[in-house]
Image: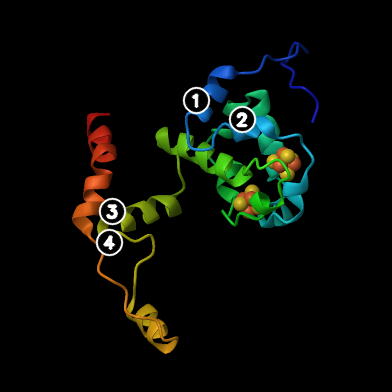
Amino acid sequence: MPPPKNTNDEVVRVNFDFRRALAEKVEGNLAGFCYQCGACVGDCPAATYSSVFNPREIMLKVLYGLGEELLVEDSVLWLCTNCYNCHERCPQDVKPVEVIISLKNMLADRGIYPNAVEKIIRTFEETGRTTPISAAVERNREKYGLPPLSPVPMDEIHALLEPAESEGESA
Ligand code: SF4
Ligand code: SF4
């Protein structure tokens, strides 16, 4: 990918405000170590099945500070499956998946996330789990000799969520 240009064919300056904001997230500063080898792409299921998703290009956009191309409605970021193959492959310990998670968190801070993610959030708030536990799940656990799941300490979950909940109320 060549350096980004604007419509007047001038080179666009790196948006360091975006990079600084990303660096404040967990592992958000790691893209700075990316040397664009592309090793993260080969085993990426999202890149295999989508022509618009490429973790190397996402790291390059971060390096260029092109946050506004990533932090949009219907962002390609949500195509990442969080499989961590890129983390295993990267020779620079960039942890592309962690950078992508940080970018997703920036989107969520703006209130932008797919319905499926909203559903997971609601399930977590209500049950303390990201997936509802059905009788079928319990039966399968028994079949494989696993103990029943322990009850979730919901008071602890709500105590952990409290700062985010009060932020949401005051927003
Ligand atoms: S494998 Fe690591 S260094 Fe190579 S392009 Fe991907 S993130 Fe960058
Ligand atoms: S974690 Fe995301 S970016 Fe990394 S290999 Fe898996 S799908 Fe691709």
SS under mark 1: helix
**First-in-chain label (4 vs 2):** 2
* Pointer 4 with pointer 2, Cβ within 8 A: no
Q: CA distance from mark 3 to mark 4?
A: 6 Å
SS under mark 2: helix
Residue plotted at (62% across, 44% down): 95
List the residue tagged with mark 2: 69
Q: Position of residue 6 (x, y in %)?
A: 71, 16
Residue plotted at (59% across, 50% down): 79
Quadrant in which the N terminus is drawn: top right
Camera-nearest label, 4 or 1: 1
**Disc 1 packing (10 Å; few <14; some 14–19; many ≥20):** some
Q: CA distance from mark 2 to mark 1?
A: 15 Å
Viewer-proximal residue among 55 and 91: 91
Label 2 is placed on what type of residue?
A: Glu
Camera-nearest label, 2 or 1: 1
Quadrant in which the C terminus is drawn: top left
Label 1 is placed on what type of residue?
A: Ala
**Disc 3 packing (10 Å; few <14; some 14–19; many ≥20):** some
**First-in-chain label (1 vs 3):** 1
List the residue tagged with mark 3: 125
Camera-nearest label, 1 or 3: 1
* Pointer 4 with pointer 1, Cβ within 8 A: no
Label 4 is placed on what type of residue?
A: Thr
SS under mark 4: helix
List the residue tagged with mark 4: 127
**First-in-chain label (3 vs 2):** 2
